[in-house]
Image: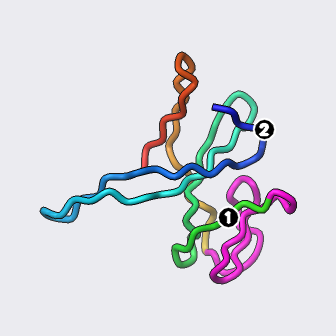
Amino acid sequence: LELTQGTPVPRVLSVRRSDGWYRERVRQTVFLVREGDNVKALSATCTHLGCQVRWEKDKQRFICPCHGGVYDAHGRVLDGPPPRPLDPVEVRVEVSSDTVLVRV
């Protein structure tokens, strides 16, 4: 997987959800970020009201289009109404296959 140091890359996952007998697959976006030899993942869901944030490369920040939340590249709140940073997502890199596994 090609990741540039410090530049978040969005990835859309297909996640199984169950509610009683009802089962479905939903799409969930995470951002993968290379930090040194490690890869970390951040949820793309704003912690304010659940809108999807986007990465603004030129300004090096995440923006929530709904209510103006602003996060830095590490997911920390810089401005707006979000009550906490973007949620971290568990990630593991399979070196042998150059694959990133994400647990959501």
- SS of the residue under disc 2: loop
Q: Say which amino acid is labelled 1.
A: Arg
Q: Main secondary structure of the magenta part?
A: loop
Residue 54 location, quadrant: bottom right
Is the residue 98 above or below the residue 49 in the image? above
How many neighbours does mark 2 have within 10 angstroms: few (below 14), some (14-19), or many (20 or more)?
few
Q: Nearer the viewer, mark 2 or mark 1?
A: 1
Q: Secondary structure at mark 1?
A: strand
Three-letter code for the amino acid on which mark 2 is drawn: Gln
In the drawing, does residue 95 fall left or right of residue 55? left
Residues rendered magenta in the picture: 57-82
Residue at horizontal 32%, vertical 56%? 25
Residue under label 2: 5
- Residue 22 position, x and y percent, is 17, 64
User: Seen from this angle, which residue lies furthest left?
Assistant: 21
Q: Is residue 94 left or right of residue 62?
A: left
The residue that disc 1 covers is 54
Which residue ends up furthest to the right in the rendered image? 58
* Point 78% across, 62% down: residue: 56
Figure check: 91 above or below 24: above
